[in-house]
Image: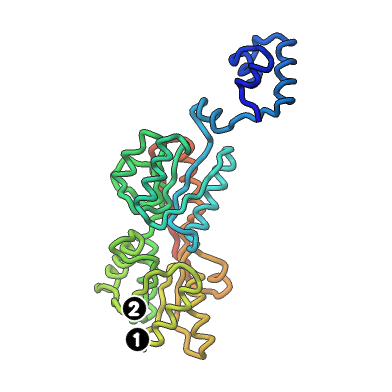
């Protein structure tokens, strides 16, 4: 595969003349253009898209950092990001991090080297202050509430819906409530918000023995139910971090001919609709769309999307 210098050597014209033909510029004689275009075909020249993008200062690439894709939170978020990016002729590259700070920093170095025009952090281990130091290399968007920090963000407001959900649970008379979470509250803003909302309504912290972390998918819900059964803990309600997780827990009780406790999920998945189960819709598709638009525009703005408690 030839390069511009080889085309110039073959035709006898300068690199700048070859470049003008490649970039469809004027000021090239018709005969010269014909000779160069013939050489391009004969030598099988293919433009280097990355080099062209760098020369124009833009690659139309968005790096999307996510710890994993096992939870519907990320699926719905990515779907929204993809829709907005595609509409603007941008490509996205998914960058798994597994919540490893050194991996996230390596991705930021790629932003610095212009591999990406911008980056979206669906969740992150490194501090927002660290993220802010890289904003000079390109737009960075986070998907959590950044507070008063000047960083672009698109996020869902969870507190009102969590409080409404726990007030509803309390009103139904449930007392022994299991909380299923992806990560512990000391490392997860979402878990921390969930536990704080619980305490606000019940005026006490959640019972530690009824909290299970590391929960991401349906199989985890199934395993959590098995754990609670073996522990013989009193349990009359399961507050799951996804509808499919709650469905997995329900499956365990049914398969073992055990009474099924009341349950609530999150993300308004098909499973909660089919099971007529209460849920919380965080409207993550909309969050993703707004995150992509911020990454493309470079605007340092914050979009807050209200979540919704759905009773069924």
- Label 1 and label 2: CA atoms lie apart by 8 Å
Q: In x, y percent, where is residue 52?
A: 56, 28
Q: Secondary structure at mark 2?
A: helix
Look at 43% across and 68% down and name the residue there.
241
Look at 70% across and 8% down and name the residue there.
29
Look at 40% across and 53% down and name the residue there.
123
Q: Quadrant of residue 209?
A: bottom left
User: Label 2 near label 1: C-beta < 8 Å?
Assistant: yes
Q: Earlier in the sequence, mark 1 or mark 2?
A: 2
Q: Position of 213 compared to 63: left or right?
A: left
Q: Nearer the viewer, residue 58 or 197?
A: 58
State whether residue 133 is above or below residue 264: above
Residue 233 tag number: 1
Q: Residues within 10 Å of mark 1 (few under 14, many from 20)?
A: few
Look at 41% across and 58% down and name the residue there.
98
Q: Residues within 10 Å of mark 2 (few under 14, many from 20)?
A: some
Q: In x, y percent, where is residue 216?
A: 45, 67
Q: Secondary structure at mark 1?
A: loop
Residue 210 tag number: 2
Q: Nearer the viewer, residue 118 or 107?
A: 107
Q: In x, y percent, where is residue 17?
A: 62, 13
């Amino acid at each position: 595969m030839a390069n511009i210098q080889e085309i110039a050597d073959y035709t006898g014209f300068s690199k700048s003349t070859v470049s003008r033909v490649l970039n469809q510029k004027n000021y090239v004689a018709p005969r010269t253009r014909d000779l160069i275009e013939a050489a391009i075909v004969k030598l099988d020249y293919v433009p280097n898209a990355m080099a062209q993008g760098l020369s124009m200062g833009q690659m139309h690439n968005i790096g999307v950092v996510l710890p994993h894709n096992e939870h519907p939170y990320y699926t719905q978020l990515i779907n929204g990001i993809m829709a907005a990016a595609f509409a603007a002729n941008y490509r996205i590259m998914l960058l798994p991090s597994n919540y490893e700070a050194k991996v996230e920093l390596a991705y930021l170095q790629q932003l610095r080297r212009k591999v990406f025009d911008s980056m979206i952090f669906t969740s992150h281990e490194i501090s927002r202050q660290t993220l802010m130091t890289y904003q000079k290399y390109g737009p960075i968007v986070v998907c959590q509430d950044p507070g008063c920090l000047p960083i672009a963000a698109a996020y869902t407001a969870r507190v009102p819906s969590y409080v409404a959900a726990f007030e509803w649970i309390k009103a139904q008379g449930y007392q022994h409530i299991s909380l299923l979470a992806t990560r512990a509250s000391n490392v997860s803003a979402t878990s921390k918000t969930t536990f704080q909302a619980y305490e606000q309504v019940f005026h006490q912290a959640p019972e530690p023995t009824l909290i299970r972390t590391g929960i991401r998918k349906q199989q985890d819900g199934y395993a959590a139910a098995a754990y609670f059964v073996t522990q013989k803990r009193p349990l009359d309600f399961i507050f799951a971090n996804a509808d499919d997780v709650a469905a997995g827990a329900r499956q365990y009780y049914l398969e073992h001919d055990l009474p099924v406790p009341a349950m609530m999920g999150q993300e308004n998945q098909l499973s909660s609709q089919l099971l007529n189960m209460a849920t919380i819709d965080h409207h993550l598709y909309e969050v993703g769309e707004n995150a992509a638009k911020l990454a493309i525009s470079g605007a340092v703005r914050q979009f807050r999307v209200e979540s919704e408690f759905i009773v069924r």
